[in-house]
Amino acid sequence: MQEQAQRTPDALALVSEEGSLSYGALERLAQRMAHALRAHGIGAQTPVLLHSERSLLGAIGLLAIWNVGGVLVPVDISVPQERLAWMAQETQAPLLLCSRAYQEPAQALGIPSLCLSDNWWQGAAGENDVVEGASDLHEGAYILYTSGSTGRPKGVLVSHAAIVNRLLWGAQALALGERDRLGQVASWGFDIALWELLAPWLVGGTTVLLSSAQVKDPARLRQGVRQEALTVLHLVPSLLHLFIEHAEGWQGGDLRAVQTGGEAVPADLVRAVLARGGVLLHQYYGPTESAISVTCWEGSEPKDGERVSLGRGIANTRLYVLDAWGEPVGIGVPGEIYIGGRGLAWGYVGRAQQTAERFVPDPFSQEPGARLYRTGDLGRYQANGELVFVGRADSQVKIRGYRIEPGEIEQVLREEPGVREAVVLARREGEEDELRLVAYVVGDEGEGERLQEQGLREALGRKVPAYMVPGRMYVLDGLPLTTNGKLDRKALLAYKERSGEEAVDEQEEERRTPVEELLCGIWQEVLGGERVGVEDDFFASGGHSLLATRLVARMRVLFGIELQVTDTFDAPTVASKRS
């Protein structure tokens, strides 16, 4: 950033609904805040929590942490207080930077917190007083938290060298230039946000911060893409699908490249993007334990029945498909995917044993100390050299781009009073056959009737992010077992709650108008599964922001009314829409 600010101080670096900053202004403000952070005791390799939505001040804070040599610990805005406290404790971060919206929960952490919009950092440095930042690319750059099977999230520590390797490769692969304008969509708790934010600054381009309201509403997202003349946009497949549905007039805009990843990419989505014409499509793959992504696939029309591959490895990356004995398998033979090279993380914060289990010595490299990361993903190589994902070696799932360990949710549920057993599975539901979480809970003797779905949902919401709260939660008398005495997962996945249908039958009488009949039908189609009553809460029944977007779109078409996604949050039942 310092070099780019010297080359093009007046060029536009950052744009948001709040305003914009040139390279020179962004660098001056980041330097000023860096000096203030140093005065608060932040120095080389000091972890600093950053709890902020996409904003100009948040970007200044991120650069300031790196300018002073600190380690960024970005916090996803959906993280509940208990999880945030765990992150603060495990990283031993001595400071939290936050936006105004998160100031109150930050103050309850027990560590100093500073609000980005206050004046604690103003006037902290002179015009020519420069903080040099990290002197060694191999120092830690950021710690990202991801779901852990033990009931606690895991912090993954990644170096500057790893993130720089990915950024440089990505800029070259897309031929980024000073005229490019990249949309910044992802929450800062996810590493893809670093690509969106930082990549334009390598070449003198512009980063455009899209608001939460724009990201949640495809119609507004489409409008923002056109108004801001975005040239590159990264969306997870589920959001990209909605964007395509509402992207009338895509042709003729400035968008030249669409990127996706984080979950399986259906062949029909690829066809839908390519049908728009004139747009380059890239799919990326890579776990949090590597910097952003390690493979890239460039879209081409899939043949009937052909699975969209993960593509090939990026620069300075080694990929292997190995059997249970750590030996390479043949072309077309499934095995576990191992990752090596410059993009690997250091390991897990404070978890030496887990680090040793997952980051193993690389027997195929001559480089001293070279390691491979065992992904747990199963894949196979095609004859053309591309890698295809075929499943998981464990129960981990990816839903809407979020990596989720069901075991973590199960452990949190078991900690609730009255809960004896809990199983969390992912099953496909709804019109788009989406993967969704479902929980099955068994109470202690005599406690089953006392356990309520809403209470369990609220308890979970205090400990895990919203995307980890199952959309459906069933309280059972016991878990079904196979003849061998093992958990019968197929029986659980096929389970439908009978009492729920009876409750809906009672609500049938309350449907007062044909409009409510139609609304209940739309609710059911979008959510999938059981019938929906007028008092059923959309979000408590498994809905989320992307499904709310689809719901609003259906209502616009059917009734010709202009609704916002936020209207669904304000009135989440059919009955609540009577007014």
Image: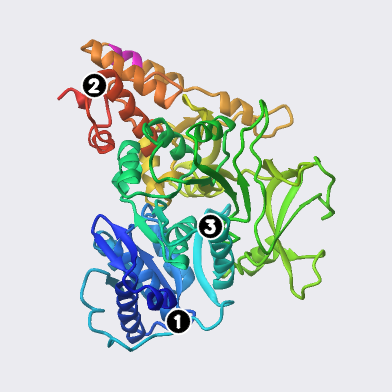
Residue 146 seen in render = yes
Quadrant in the rendering for residue 75: bottom left
Q: Which residue is mark 2?
A: 560
Upstream in the sequence, badge 3 or badge 2? 3
Q: Which residue is mark 1?
A: 133
- Amino acid type at image mark 3: Ala
Magenta highlight: main SS: helix
521 within the magenta span: no
As drawn, the label of residue 400 is none
- Amino acid type at image mark 1: Gly
As drawn, the label of residue 175 is 3
Determine whether, in the image, residue 202 is placed left or right of residue 62. Answer: right
Between 246 and 110, the one lying in front of the other is: 246
Q: Is residue 579 above or below residue 203?
A: above
Q: x and y percent of residue 520 in the render?
A: 32, 19
What residue range appears in magenta?
504-508
Q: Residues within 10 Å of mark 3 (few under 14, many from 20)?
A: few
Q: x and y percent of residue 103 in the render?
A: 26, 64
Upstream in the sequence, badge 1 or badge 3? 1
Q: Nearer the viewer, mark 1 or mark 3?
A: 3
Please report the residue visible at 74 percent of the width from the left and 70 percent of the height from the top: 370
- SS class, disc 1: loop
